Amino acid sequence: MKNLVVIVLAALLSGCCRQSAEELRLPGDYVTTLAGTHSDYSFSTGNTYPAVAVPWGMNFWTPQTGKMGDGWIYTYGAHTIRGLKQTHQPSPWINDYGQFSLMPVCGKGKIDEEARQSWFSHQSETAKPYYYSVYLADHDVVAEMAPTERAAIMRFTFPESDESGIVIDAFDRGSQLKMLDERTIAGYTTRNSGGVPENFRNYFVVRFDKQIESYRFYDGKRPSDGNGVTGEHALAGIYFTTHRGERVTVRTASSFISEEQAIRNLETELGGDDFDAVKGKAQCRWNEVLGRIEVSGGTEEQYRTFYSCLYRSTLFPRKFYEINAEGKPVHYSPYNGEILPGYMYTDTGFWDTFRSLFPLLNLVYPSVGAEIQAGLANAYRESGFLPEWASPGHRGCMVGNNSASVVADAILKGITPEEDIATLYEAMLAGRSKVHSMVSSTGRWGHEYYNTLGYVPYDVDIPENVARTLEYAYDDWCIAQVAKLLGRAEDVRILEEASRNYGNLFDPETKLMRGRNTDGTFQSPFSPYKWGDAYTEGNAWHYTWSVFHDIGGLSDLMGGKAEFGKMLDSVFVVPPIYDDSYYGVRIHEITEMQVANMGNYAHGNQPAQHIIYLYNYIGQPWKTQFWTREVMDRLYSAKPDGYCGDEDNGQTSAWYVFSALGFYPVCPGTDEYVVGSPLFRKAVIHLENGENIVIEAPGNSPENRYVNKMTVDGEVSEKTFLKYDDLRNGAKVRFDMQKEPDKERGTKTGDVPYSMSDRTHSS
């Protein structure tokens, strides 16, 4: 096959999905949604599920192999499917909410998930972003589905039987199903995993193109007489006679607002389209979104990996708003339970995604970023806090106040709607001095200590105190950049001073970040290999580098660039030993670090993912180039075990997308991207403003991973970073690649990326 992806973007944007004359594949055809699904509780190769969706859609659909309530909805090693499930799950660790499922069956007694499950094979399964198909052997049924943003269409090909049917499962913990007419079932589910008000419901409607001949409702395993059931666990068996090969089409949609809105979503999004039309529109939408980035000059496997990662990068955060009868966006608030105007997005954890997922959206999909920021302003208005982990409302997970990074980067890049900037600035400032009364990960736990001592102490029963301090310091720097933009001089002074708090936890003896007690002494005993405790899902070797805004200052603390380089080298040299005494068990992130065979570098978890790029700050960019290729080549693929840890809502995927393009946003909030080693011989980013970023590396190959020369719009640049303003107006970046490292290029003071301590280099 030719190593070329040809996309006529104008045709895609106009809704035409025809391929070029060469009959080459479109980007959506390179995607496998099964990447990362060969995972379990003890070992993650992604912890993903095959989401059948449109980009950022409110509802996803997926085949369900796990039992009801199991966060591992679909695992590649499973043998049976229990249903086709509407899901809003961002992660198995966060679990799901607002879910229900449909399962075609042959036999009237097969209602509960054990009785109705069917064996299947991956050989009889097709998994695309816009289409899923599987043969359910125990029922002799082919099941297919295709998505819209808030609805889906399913097509079931039945055998000859007078007991063909579909089981609708509204799940337990409170649900309802009822007949609306001879072809339509409505219902709601309340099942959730937290982060919802008392009145939370996901209303749904299921409409058949074939008249229902008989039906039976159940509450759990207990049959219920009549035309509906409201109880702990509502189920329904819907039956009709079919001849062999007969297709039954099912249309379904849901709403967090009302049953009436669910019907509106069904009618407006599906209309009179048949299955193939819905599938075709979803396919076109994916090709439009994925086609924003064209890559060529790579291998088939690299295309598959790149576009599978880009697919994952454009799923979350998902829309949590709907369109009312007047055509206006409205949303059910997961913060106060009211129906309110405007946008809302959810299902993301900023501790993960502030690093590269949101910078990718801001560069390539700014119109989506603008809606997200408007939604964040609404979240603050409705709850008094910016979310840190939302699913759908505030959830208690991870640390930091990284909403500041997500908000600041968008404001500074001109993404945020003008009318929301003041509210979001107020929200960032407010988050510095309070913590949510019920969700300690929202706001700043330990802010009293941080704002007085300059760090969160080790001895005050606030876990992960080093991680919190380092992230709060970076977040303060982010807010300071917005304060500069708004002309808030006194705020700038206070925030910039606070952003230096990272230095309060630097231990000159070990040259690592170390927990510190209220009396100023460092924690003792101390092991740099101890996971957790003062850190979050990592150890001192991972978290010491979380000074995104002032790598130069960190280098000075370590004794200069030479010492910094030795410490950075050590991350990859020290053996993958660990201390799991804080957890009491070896958590899966530890195992994933071990098996990668890269010393104590743990790419499978987010705190370490920027480390490789830090060699640019000390005049050793060739080491960045070496390690970025190593990670892309060894730790990523489009296979079911294609990730080296949790994929985490697009963050680990966005790292690959950026790195394959040849640059990475080490410090969101600056206007810079740090240069690595481009993977393809050519890439084109089609910006929403009509301009293009063209990245060429014609001499690229697996052997030629080192940059010899970089030009930007024809001008030679010795710098090891690219500027946002240069890229967003359209740019042509060319890399000359070679086999041996160039140890002269990018070594001068002015060549290195931004650090706060370097007053000659401002962001």
Image: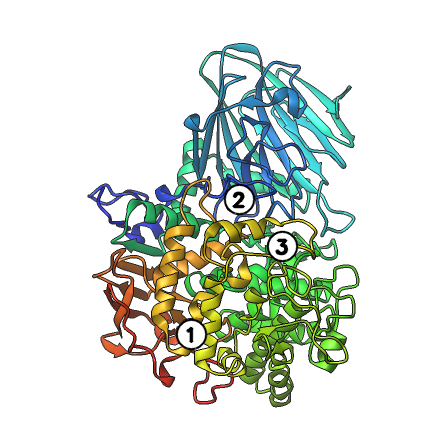
- Could you tell me which secondary element the residue under label 3 belongs to? strand
Amino acid found under the numbered disc labelled 1: Glu
Please determine whether, in this image, residue 407 is positioned above or below residue 748: above
Amino acid found under the numbered disc labelled 2: Thr
- Dot 2: few (<14), some (14–19), or many (≥20) neighbours within 10 Å? many
Name the quadrant containing residue 495.
Answer: bottom right
- Could you tell me which secondary element the residue under label 1 belongs to? strand
Nearest the camera: 644 or 450? 644
Please determine whether, in this image, residue 135 is positioned above or below residue 97: above
Q: Is residue 184 visible?
A: yes
Name the quadrant containing residue 343.
Answer: bottom right
Q: Position of residue 716 (x, y in %)?
A: 25, 78
- Dot 3: few (<14), some (14–19), or many (≥20) neighbours within 10 Å? some
Please determine whether, in this image, residue 613 is positioned above or below residue 212: below
The numbered disc on residue 610 is none
Of the numbered discs 1 and 3, the one sitting upstream in the chain is 3
Q: Residue at x 61, y 38 (%)?
A: 263
